[in-house]
Amino acid sequence: MAATLTGTIKVELLPGSFGAGTIYTGDFSYDDTYLTKVGIETMTISDLAVPGLLFFNFRFLDFATGLTPVTYTAKDIVGFPDNPTLYFENGIPTQFGAMVDPGNNGGIWTMNDGFMFADTGRFDFILGNGTNAGVGTVTLELNKPTSTEEPPSVPENSSPLAFLLATLGLGASYSWKKSVKVNS
């Protein structure tokens, strides 16, 4: 059965990195309709791979100031809508393939501003055109599904008085029907 699943992206910057110890988060959602859940599979927003990635958001530092966190979406990723790419192993999300290159200058590959999710569990970034940089660890975690449906209610006996009144009402109805038959 297909389902829309949501997850959380967590990046913790490692010692030696600008902002070491800081944690940045994001979220993502996908529809697993076309996943076989066998082996390694990839998913994008387009149909370059398995279609089904619905959204990607990641909150990280603004490249203009290097201070204020802003939210980057899938549209900020180089190669959108064929990227970002979500990788799976046996139906479990394992990593993102994504690069943000705000100046279209090659991003971190050419020591310019940008960040990327490339290797499993790794996040790389450069701010200030090489003056601040770092590496972080990446964790993807699926959120527990929430149900918006309430289970059907089961009527309960309100009180002994309600039971007594209901019984008397049934008895009165029976007596009335019996008297109508006798009078007919």
Image (cartoon, rainbow, N blue to C red):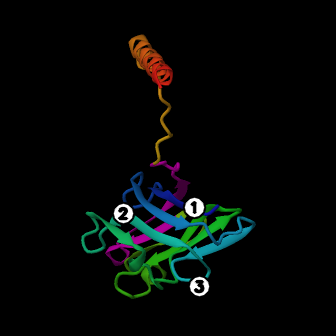
As shown in the figure, which amino acid type bears the numbered disc 2?
Arg
Kindly identify which residue carries mark 2. Answer: 59
73 to the left or right of 149: left
As shown in the figure, which amino acid type bears the numbered disc 3?
Leu
Nearest to viewer (mark 2 / mark 1): 1
Which secondary structure, mark 1? loop
Where is residue 25, by image quadrant?
bottom left
User: What's the magenta region?
Assistant: 123-148
Q: Closer to the N terminus: mark 2 or mark 3?
A: 3
Q: Nearer the viewer, residue 12 or 15?
A: 12
Label 1, label 3: how many angstroms apart (C-alpha)? 21 Å
174 to the left or right of 165: right
Farthest residue, direction front = 184
Q: Closer to the N terminus: mark 1 or mark 3?
A: 1
Kindly identify which residue carries mark 1. Answer: 3
Q: Which residue is pictured at 50% across the width and 31% down the height?
A: 154
As shown in the figure, which amino acid type bears the numbered disc 1?
Ala
Which quadrant of the rendered structure holds the N terminus?
Answer: bottom right
Where is residue 114, by image quadrant?
bottom left
Q: Which residue is pictured at 52% across the width and 48% down the height?
A: 144
Kindly identify which residue carries mark 3. Answer: 48
22 to the left or right of 155: left
Q: Which residue is pictured at 50% across the width and 39% down the height?
A: 152
Q: Position of residue 65 (x, y in %)?
A: 24, 70
Mark 1 burial class by Cα count in 10 Å: few <14, some 14-19, many 20+? few
